Amino acid sequence: MQVYTFDNNVVSGSAAVTSGTGNVSGSPSFSGHTMTVNLTGVTDVQRITVTLTNVTDEFSQVLPPTAVNMNVLIGDVNGNKTVNATDVALVKSRVGQTVTGSNFREDVNADGSISSSDVALTKSDVGHGVP
């Protein structure tokens, strides 16, 4: 899922994966200043591009087509485009914590808790990186 935030309330628009592996699932949803796009089939170790088109705000202003890039790399909890010992240490330091807005990246398997399973998954991806 990707959530895009705009300056004005947005009321309509569409999205498509234009680079990388994945698909947009269904139509985007809109709530106030946000547009939510559900993605499926997104694979690990890639850069995916989602292009937003015809995004229209409450004043009928239309955003030009806009490409948004996102790196996908399981275990890269610090966002530096590589999985290494630092990521493993960060996940280990959060084991047992309740998942919050500040530590959700350490819930590597996205099961709602930070545990030894997240550490193991991160360790298994050490050495992976995206350009």
Image (tube, helix red, strand yellow):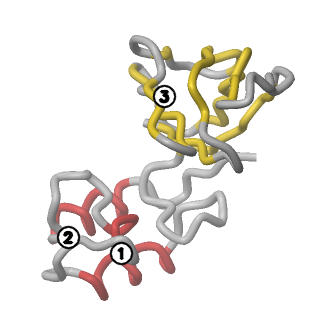
Name the amino acid type tagged 2: Ile
Q: Disc 2 or disc 3, which is closer to the eye?
A: 3
User: Against 93, is 26 above or below?
Assistant: above
Which residue is depicted at the point 25% across and 52% down? Answer: 110
Q: Is residue 4 left or right of residue 106?
A: right
For label 3, the SS is strand
* Image x and y of residue 9, in percent: 60, 40
For disc 3, the marked residue is 37
Q: Is residue 95 left or right of residue 16?
A: left
**CB-based contact (under 8 Å), mark 2 and mark 1:** yes
User: Against 6, is 11 above or below?
Assistant: above
For disc 2, the marked residue is 114
The residues tagged by marks 2 and 1 sit, at their Cα atoms, a distance apart of 9 Å
For label 2, the SS is loop
Please identify the quarter of the rendering in which residue 27 is found. top left
Q: Is residue 73 left or right of residue 110?
A: right
Q: Residues within 10 Å of mark 2 (few under 14, many from 20)?
A: many
Residue nearest the viewer, comparing 100 with 59: 59
Name the amino acid type tagged 3: Val
Specify which label sits upstream in the sequence, 3 or 1.
3
* Image x and y of residue 47, in percent: 66, 36
**CB-based contact (under 8 Å), mark 3 and mark 1:** no
Residue nearest the viewer, comparing 21 with 130: 21
User: Against 42, is 18 above or below?
Assistant: above
Q: Disc 3 or disc 1, which is closer to the eye?
A: 3
Q: Please, which residue is most extreme toward the front here?
A: 59
Name the amino acid type tagged 1: Asn
For disc 1, the marked residue is 103
Q: Residues within 10 Å of mark 1 (few under 14, many from 20)?
A: some
